């Protein structure tokens, strides 16, 4: 297959795992992390997406611990990683494990970056520097939500990895991207059948994100109201950005993203455990229901 983005879509497959825990730098957890990555590959997931402000250094051990699965950053903040350093790390990993690493980039949030100014212009400049340093456009993806960044993802990257979105946003993003670029939204999954308990777990996890204007403004652009954002999120909002319930309901919710235009869905298991937990039993359950 000569088209590199089309080849990337094949390698990623339909499902991946998004995890903040997999990016841990705790040396005492190294064995657990490596075993988890290897098991996820065996379970048939096509990609591991490292949550938080992750980098090639976080991806490298997981790539060494597996055979062929793609490992991507979701996301590497442009404010906290200089383009020259990112390019050098990309080149080193590409030399040792060709084609295994995907550089996911984004502007993060003003709350997390004191230098946050003119984020679109800063992202364009960062991409210019990566071009000059030799990082191929087809080996990077952007965490794009709004139209201008989605156009950048179309024109200067392999595509988009939007976080905390709905099937409606996925359809909107696909329209801007066109057919060829990769569209790989993240989707949170709560493996809980009871509606009250599932939504309670979901709200507890969502609370932090509802303090970040990049996400809340995106919700408001796509039909939600201020009342949907209050109190940890309305039932309507929770049900839009989570897959929860029995196996059929979870499958149907994931399928809605594919039907809206997603090539690949990055699935994040959410429960009441700490955010850096590796939910290995839940990952096995998820693999079974997707089989």
Image (cartoon, rainbow, N blue to C red):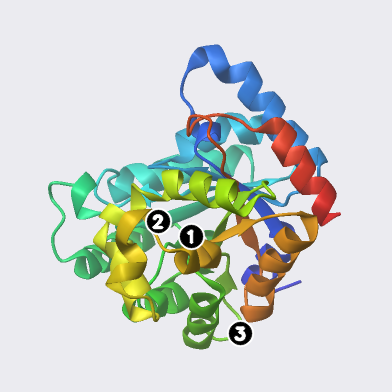
Q: Nearer the viewer, mark 1 or mark 2?
A: 2
Location of residue 246 in the rendering, given as x and y in whole percent from the top left corner: 75, 54
Residue 179 tag number: 3
Q: Is residue 101 above or below residue 35?
A: below
Q: Quadrant of residue 15?
A: bottom right
* Residue depicted at 23% across the width and 45% down the height: 112
Looking at the rendered structure, the secondary structure element under dot 3 is: loop
Residue annotated with mark 2: 105
Q: Can residue 66 be seen at all in this image of the molecule?
A: no
Location of residue 141 in the rendering, given as x and y in whole percent from the top left corner: 48, 62
Looking at the rendered structure, the secondary structure element under dot 2 is: strand
Mark 1 touching mark 2, by CB under 8 A? yes
Instruction: Please tell me which of labels 3 and 1 falls first in the chain.
Output: 1
Q: Is residue 115 above or below residue 236?
A: above
Residue annotated with mark 1: 140
* Residue depicted at 55% across the width and 86% down the height: 178
Location of residue 97 in the rendering, given as x and y in whole percent from the top left corner: 64, 41
Determine whether, in the image, residue 84 is placed left or right of residue 48. Answer: left
Residue 127 tag number: none
* Residue depicted at 67% across the width and 46% down the height: 192
Mark 3 touching mark 1, by CB under 8 A? no
Instruction: Please tell me which of labels 2 and 3 falls first in the chain.
Output: 2
Location of residue 219 in the rendering, given as x and y in whole percent from the top left corner: 37, 71
Between residues 131 and 41, which one lies in front from this camera angle? 41
């Amino acid at each position: 297959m000569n088209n590199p983005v089309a080849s990337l879509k094949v390698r990623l497959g339909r499902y991946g795992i998004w995890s903040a825990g997999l990016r841990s730098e705790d040396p005492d957890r190294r064995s657990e992390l490596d075993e988890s990555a290897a098991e996820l590959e065996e379970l048939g997931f096509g990609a591991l997406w490292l949550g938080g402000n992750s980098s090639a250094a976080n991806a490298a051990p997981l790539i060494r611990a597996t055979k062929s699965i793609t490992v991507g950053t979701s996301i590497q903040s442009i404010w906290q990683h200089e383009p020259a350093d990112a390019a050098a790390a990309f080149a080193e990993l590409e030399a040792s494990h060709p084609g295994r690493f995907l550089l996911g980039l984004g502007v993060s949030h003003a709350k997390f970056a004191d230098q946050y100014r003119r984020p679109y212009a800063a992202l364009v400049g960062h991409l210019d520097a990566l071009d000059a340093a030799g990082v191929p456009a087809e080996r990077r993806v952007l965490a794009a939500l709004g139209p201008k960044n989605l156009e950048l993802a179309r024109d200067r990257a392999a595509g988009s990895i939007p976080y905390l979105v709905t099937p409606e946003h996925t359809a909107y993003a696909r329209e801007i991207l066109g057919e060829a670029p990769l569209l790989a939204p993240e989707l949170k999954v709560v493996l809980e059948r009871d509606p009250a308990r599932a939504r309670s777990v979901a709200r507890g996890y969502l609370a932090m994100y509802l303090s970040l204007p990049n996400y809340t403004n995106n919700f408001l652009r796509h039909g939600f109201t201020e009342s949907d954002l209050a109190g940890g999120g309305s039932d309507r909002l929770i049900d839009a950005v989570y897959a929860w319930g029995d196996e059929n309901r979870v499958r149907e919710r994931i399928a809605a993203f594919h039907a809206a235009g997603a090539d690949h869905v990055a699935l994040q298991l959410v429960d009441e455990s700490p955010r850096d937990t590796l939910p290995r039993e839940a990952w096995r359950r998820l693999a079974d229901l997707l089989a």
